[in-house]
Amino acid sequence: MDNIREVKAPWLAQYGDIPATLEYPALTMVQMVERMCEQYPDNVAYEFVGRKVKYRTLRQEILQTAKALYALGVRSGDRVTICMPNTPQALAMFYAINKIGAVANMTHPLSAPGEIEFYLKDSDSHTILTLDQFAPKVLEAAAKVPYPVTVIVTKVQDALSLPVKIGYQLTQKKYEIPEKPVAEKDKIVLWSRFLRDSKNVTEDVEDHTKTAADAGAILYSGGTTGTTKGILLSNLNFNALGLQTAAASGYKSLAGMKMLAVMPIFHGFGLGVCIHTALISGMDCILVPKFNVDSYTELLKEKKPNFIAGVPTLYEALLRNKNLEGVDLSYLRGVFSGGDSLSIELKKKVDAFLKAHNAPVQIREGYGTTECVTASCLTPKDTYKEGSIGVPFPDTFYKIVRVGTTEEVPYGEEGEICVSGPSVMLGYNNNPAETANTLRTHDDGRVWLHTGDLGMMDEEGFVYFRQRIKRMIITSGYNVYPSQVENIIDAHPSVLMSCVIGVRDPYKMEKIKAFVVLRPGIEKTPAVKKEILDYCRGHIAKYALPYAIEFRDELPKTLVGKVAYRKLEEEEANKPARAAKKDE
C-alpha cells in the first residue's frame, strides 16, 4: 500500500507552498541563532517588560553567560538545569549552555522540591539556574542530591532597565533569599556575581567539536506510559522543528515579525516554537513570564504580535475575556493551538471570534509529542478538514499501525500514530528499555516513534487525532473515545468546553461522566443540565451517554495549561460511595 511518503511531495505543494523537503545546516542551536545575529543585527530579538534587545546585544549576552558558565567550571557534556519562566536570563542561559557544548535540562519552576530533586539526579546536573522566589525549594532539593549542586539565583529585576526596575521593586512582593545555603555542600551564586566572573575568561569557550547530531536539551514528559521521563533531544531536533515550522507558516520570511511567547520555555511548544523558531527566523520574541488572561489581553492590544501560540485552554480563556470586545486583531498572521486536542467546536468558536475581530487568519492546530520536541503536523494556512490536525511537516512521515504492532493499516482505519523524521528524539535519558519500546525500526528500515496516540489518515494525507490510547473508556464492552463525546457536548450552545472521564462501575467496568464549563451568562441550573443531557441523547450512542454532568467554573489544568483529566479521575475515585451515588 502506498503511504504518505509517496503521495505527500506533489500534494503538499497545493497547500500554502509548503516544501516537501528542506535543507538542515550542520549547525548547533546557538550557531543558528548567531546566523540571525549576523544577518539582522539591528532587529529586535526579544522584548521583556518594556525592554527591547537587538540581535547584536543578544549575541553578547549569550557569550557573556557562556563565559560565566565556563568560569564556574561547566564544560562540554555537562548537564545544567534551567528552572525558570520565560525571562532573558533563561534565554541567555539556554543558548550559553549550548555554546560550550553542555546540555540544558529544562524543568518547571513550580515543581515541588521532590520533583526538582528527581530532575537533578536523573540528568546528573551539578548546576541549576532559578528565580529568587523559587530558590528556597531549589536549595531544599539540591541538599538531597548526593553531590554538590551550584544554585545560580536571579531576580526579574536583573533583566529590567533602571526606570522599570525601580517601579517593579515598588510594586512587586519581595522574596527573601537565604543568606546561607541549606547545607554546606550546596553553593549559591547570585546572577550579578555570576556574570562578573565572566570577565576572568579570555579563551574561546565554544565547543567546536559538538555537531547538530549531538544532544542539546532534556525535556520532561509522561511519554506513552504516564511516568516522568527525560527526553534527550539533539541540536538537529530543535533546528529541524524551527525550520519546518517556519516553512509551514505560509510565509517566505518571518524576519521582523513578532511572536508572543506565552508558552513556557521548559515546554517543547514554548521552547521549540515560541522561542527557537522565532530566534532562528529573525523574529521579535515577546517574552511573557506568566500567563494571566488580563495581562495577555493588554499585550495583544499593546504589542500587536503577528503570531500567537497556546494550548486550547488559553483560547477558551480569551473567549471569556470582555476586554477584547471591539479590539482590532487584523495584525495577526498566525494563530496556533497545540499541546492538547482542540475540539471541533472550540475551533469554530475561536474562528468566529477571530473573524469578528478582523483577523485574516483561522486558528491552526498542530499535533506532536515532546518526543519530537513538539509539533510534527499542522493544518495548512488556508485549508481545513473538520476534525483533522493537518498534514505532516516537511521531511516528516506519518504511519498508522495496528495497536501493539508495526503493521500499517489502510487509509481511513484507526490505529496508533507513528512518526519518523529529523525532529524525533535521540531517546529517553537513562531509560534504554523504554527507548527501545518507543523508537522501533520497521520493515521499511526507518526508525518510527510510537506515540501512544490513536488516529487515522485519509488518502489525501490529512491526519486525524483521536486521543491517547490509554485514555480510552471501556463501558459494557464498548470502546468510547472521550474526545468524541466532548466534541458533541461542546457543540451545545450553552457549553464553552467539557471534559469526559470514565468512572469505575461494578457492572459496566466504567461509566461516563462529563464535567462542563458553561458559556458566560449561562446559569448552572437543573434545566440547563437537562437540556445538555437531552442533546446528548440525540447525538450520542446510548452506551456512550454520560450518566451525569457536573458543572465547573473552570476545569483543572496541568502546569502547562492542558486539561488535567487525570485529576478529575482521581477526584471521582476518592469520592465516598454516597456522594458518587448522588450523581446518578
Image (cartoon, grey):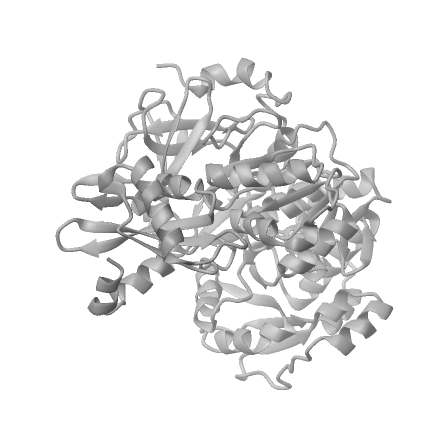
The image shows residue 33 at horizontal and vertical percentages of 72, 43
Residue at the outermost front position: 527
Q: How many marks?
A: 0
The image shows residue 373 at horizontal and vertical percentages of 52, 43
Residue 154 in which image quadrant: bottom right
From the viewer's perspective, is 228 left or right of 505?
right
The image shows residue 337 at horizontal and vertical percentages of 56, 42
Residue 188 in which image quadrant: bottom right
Work out whether residue 76 or residue 283 is closer to the camera in this orientation and state it. Answer: 283
Q: Relative to 87, is 418 above or below? A: above
Q: Relative to 202, is 37 above or below? A: above
From the viewer's perspective, is 404 left or right of 7?
left
The image shows residue 567 at horizontal and vertical percentages of 37, 60
Work out whether residue 541 or residue 215 is closer to the camera in this orientation and state it. Answer: 541
Q: Relative to 290, is 239 above or below? A: above
Can residue 205 be seen here? The reply is: no
From the viewer's perspective, is 561 left or right of 203?
left
Work out whether residue 450 or residue 31 is closer to the camera in this orientation and state it. Answer: 450
Residue at 47%, 63% in the rendered image: 119
Residue at 62%, 41% in the rendered image: 353
> The C terminus appears in which quarter of the rendering?
bottom left
Residue at 46%, 69% in the rendered image: 117
From the viewer's perspective, is 420 left or right of 254?
left
> The N terminus appears in which quarter of the rendering?
top left
Can residue 248 be seen here? The reply is: yes
Residue at the outermost bottom position: 180
Residue at 51%, 42% in the rendered image: 346
